[in-house]
Image (tube, coloured by chain):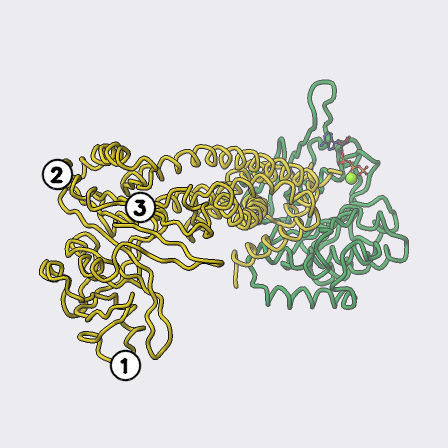
Amino acid sequence: MTALMELRGACRCYGSGAARVQALDHVDLDIAAASSIAIMGASGSGKSTLLNILGGLDRLDGGSYRVDGRDISKFGDNKLSAMRLRRFGFVFQGFHLIPQLNVLENIELPLYYRGVDNVTARRRALRLAGRFGLENRIHHLPAQLSGGQQQRVAIARALANEPDILFADEPTGNLDSASGAQVLDVLQQLVQEGKTLVLVTHDEAVAAAMQRLVRMCDGRVVS
Amino acid sequence: MTGRMVILWRDVVLGVTDLRRHGGRSVLTMLGIVFGVASVIAMLAVGNGASREALRQIRQLGSDVIILNAVKPAELLNQGTRHRIMSVYGLTFEDVERIKATVPGVHLLVPVKVRREQVVNPAGVVDVRLVGTKPAWFRLVMHRLMAGRLLTALDVQRRQAVAVVTDTLARRLFPLKPVLGSYVRAGGSSYRVVGVVSSVSLSGMLQSVAGAEDIYVPLSALRERNGDVLLRYKSGGSVRERVQLHRVLLKMARERDVEATAAALRTMLHRFHRRDDVKVKVPLALLRQAERTQRRFNIVLGAIAGISLLVGGIGIMNIMLASVTERTREIGVRRAIGASRADIMRQFIIETVVLAAGGGVLGVLLGFALPWLITRFSGVDTLVTGSSVVLSLLISVAVGLVFGLYPARRAALLNPVEALRHG
Ligand SMILES: Nc1ncnc2c1ncn2[C@@H]1O[C@H](COP(=O)(O)OP(=O)(O)OP(=O)(O)O)[C@@H](O)[C@H]1O
Ligand SMILES: [Mg+2]
């Protein structure tokens, strides 16, 4: 069985000359569909860089990256954007909701870029808001929500276009343990529903909840 | 609404929301556009207004016409009513003979005598203007004959008390009776109505040459019945005026003779009318004058419009660049979600266009005020047309598009990862 995501000899470096940093150094990594994987490592070890590459936000300087056997490192910007829109969902440490949009509008946003009509979009957003216990907050602005609520909105938004792969960069990093646990619970449920989850964390407990663990050091996968 | 339309509409709403957040800043930025658009409208309004009157005269009279008007000299105007002095001024029959004898190339010469009178009929009092003239009047002024006949040489020769009335006046004077053959009593005499013509309204810069309230009668008949003296009642007394002819219309055989002839007439009339109680008006020259005025305003307003729009455009570009920087992370988030470069580009272009068009709308409002002020303080006739409003709104949208392009491109080309790390 070929993996869903397949990284071969992946290199990514920043800067030049003396300031040159090899953020990814010939990384090989296979991730199976419907699995969950945690990426751990010291600060600056290249976790976020790896996640951004996997999520199609960033491009490789060398090596290849295949999704479903197709080398998306050769994709143009439009095809890559479409890939993110349809198949990938992102959850960030800082929530990254759009401050001037309310909860529903934030959740609807990916649907608009998809060209979904606004009645359907509204219906889907309401369903997602309900699922994550936000039904009483749908007209609130992000600034009026707690961190845990904001992160649940972000997860709802990431799920709006029903992607099959979720990328989460320290999703619980800014949360207290209770809301962190709640968010982790939500993510685990999604894996059970068949989504693939790639998660970066500093928290051993969070990592332990994943099916597989990868450790990074200086841009290399060490285990 | 489906698909792309939805995104477009969302972008407009978002754009407006964002602009409202920065209300004061947005308005300041819009000022350039506001003034630019207002100048465009004012410029077109002056152009339209200046030529409108002259063009109308020319359409109705032809471009080969010279008009001599009797003008009450200033010293008589200020005389007041106490002295009971007879004011004598205006064109004379001698002038007419002199013109006939010495000015070449005159195709038609139409002397006109005017008396403002009131006609009493069962319906009430109707203000009319008795216009004593010659049959040539109807060859010079573009009336349409609606019923009956026009004045003839025989009417003039026999001093017949016959009248041709305008259709407007006919309806008011004889709402129930047939018009032709009825009598209208004005200035102490009765005139039999022999014809009805369409009313021609010629006024404005040239005073009232023809109007809807006109009754055309043979000059000889009017003169025989009322003489040359007009008694005018004013508050506190009356003024007596003796005017032989109030107006002489000349139609030249060739248009190119108009201006030279007008100059010759001025010289000649000045010799016999030292008090300048006769003014020579040339519709063609008025049009030229209007065009000159228009050009002057065009240069000034065009420069203001150009500079304002440029400054406004740059201001808008500036604020949009600031907005892109401020919202870098938002752009990164949108890109992560799956927005393409085109999506981001469109969003910022629409915002810029909304901002510019908002300025355009304010500019249109100011654009109505500016011509009004110009008319008020410089006397230049202005006319704001719908097409100039549409045009200037289009210009403001175009400014938004042009100056929105660069900031929108900047936003679209941001690296998603770096945009996300920003701020
Ligand atoms: N845009 C950039 N320009 C220069 N260097 C960068 C850039 N992005 C990342 N780096 C460098 O690449 C290396 C890997 O960074 P990355 O963000 O992937 O680390 P990380 O493992 O996610 O760390 P943390 O746990 O602190 O989030 C670091 O040394 C970092 O300084
Ligand atoms: Mg990181």
3 and 2 marks in contact (CB < 8 Å): no
In the rendered image, which quarter is residue A70 located in? top right
Residue lying furthest bottom: B176
- Counting residues from the N terminus, which is met first, the one under dot 1 or under dot 2? 2
Q: Colour of chain B?
A: yellow
Q: Is the residue B344 above or below the residue B211 in the image?
A: above
Colour applied to chain A: green
Chain to which mark 3 belongs: B
**What residue is shown with label 3?**
B70
Q: Which residue is mark 2?
A: B101
Amino acid under disc 1: Leu
Chain under label 1? Answer: B
Q: In 3D space, how far apart are the residues under numbered discs 1 and 2 (Cα atoms)?
A: 48 Å
Q: Residue furthest top?
A: A18
Q: Nearer the viewer, mark 3 or mark 1?
A: 3
Q: Amino acid at mark 3?
A: Ala
Give the Cα separation between the discs numbered 3 and 1.
38 Å
Q: Which residue is mark 1?
A: B176
The residue lying toward the viewer, choosing from B260 and A35, is B260
Badge 1 density bin: few <14, some 14–19, many ≥20, Cα 10 Å? few
Residue A186 at x, y = what percent?
A: 78, 60
Pick the residue in front: A90 or B317: B317
